[in-house]
Image (tube, rainbow, N blue to C red):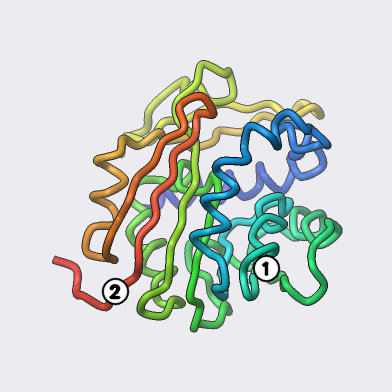
Amino acid sequence: MGEARKLAEKMCEYYGARAPWHDCYMGYTGNAALEELLAPIVAVVEELLSGRDVLEVACGTGNWTEVLAKRAASVLATDVNESTLRRAEAKDRPVGAVNFQAADAYTLEGVRGGFTGAFASDWWSHVPRSLLPPFLDSLHERLEEGARVVFLDMLPSDHPDLTPYRQDDEGNAICRRTLPDGRVFDVVKNFPRERDVLESVTGRGEGAEYHEWRELRRWLVTYTVSNTPRS
């Protein structure tokens, strides 16, 4: 797991460095056409987490935090990078609906428990395979029975940033990314199959549902946390 953790640390470094350009990369800079395209996914996320106290993992620059804040009872948005949290905090949102906290997504050390919802966008694909189970364990320790969990992520694409150039020993797909300032980073970008995703949450909850929006290159999995021991 040592090599996986090194990859995870490098990705944290990458996204901290990428913060000034992140929204532009993702097309989140006043792109009305993109907002219209994402509307069906936004509606699903809002409905699933409406009225819940939501723990958002790896919130980045806070674009999905704004979505969550509209319908959730409360949101604690977490990220390991202060550079991204500062940008997230600067965005519009209902007063008092969102709090921010610096936290390592893999351990969530220092994050309180008692949440009735959890959300992460474009995070699952960056988690090295061997770190996925302990990440889910840490997340579930902070969730109440009956909490609704939602993960949203990407389907494969031929975009250069999403095209792996190698695979490591545990099967992680590694992409190479270059920032505008010339710095180069290796980034884990896995594209799990529906079966892989559902197997990963088996025994952690009930009623798992998987959805795809192929035209938007997005998948979503949602389930309800139960205290049933994993088999």
Residue 220 horizontal side relative to residue 34, left or right: left
42 vs 222, left or right, is: right
Q: Which mark is residue 192?
A: none
Badge 1 marks a residue whose secondary structure is strand
Closer to the eye: label 1 or 2: 2
Q: Marks 1 and 2, how far apart in space?
A: 27 Å
For the view shown, which residue lies furthest in the left direction?
A: 231
Picture disc at residue 226:
2
Location of residue 210 with respect to 35 vertically, above or below:
below
The residue drawn where x is 69% and y is 64% is 69
Residues 198 and 134: in front is: 198
Q: Which residue is mark 1?
A: 102
Residue at (81% x, 36% y) in the render: 29
Q: How dense is the environment of label 2, judged by Cα within 10 Å: few (below 14), some, or many (20 and up)?
A: some
Marks 1,2: beta carbons within 8 A: no
**Residue 110 percent across, percent down from the top left:** 58, 79
Q: Residue 92: where, in percent of width, then height?
A: 84, 58
Against 192, residue 10 (above or below) is below
Give the camera-side residue of 8 and 146.
146
Going by the numbered disc 2, the residue's amino acid type is Ser
- Residue at (66%, 29%) from the top-left corner? 184
- First in sequence, mark 1 or 2: give its number: 1
Does 4 appear above or below 114?
Answer: above
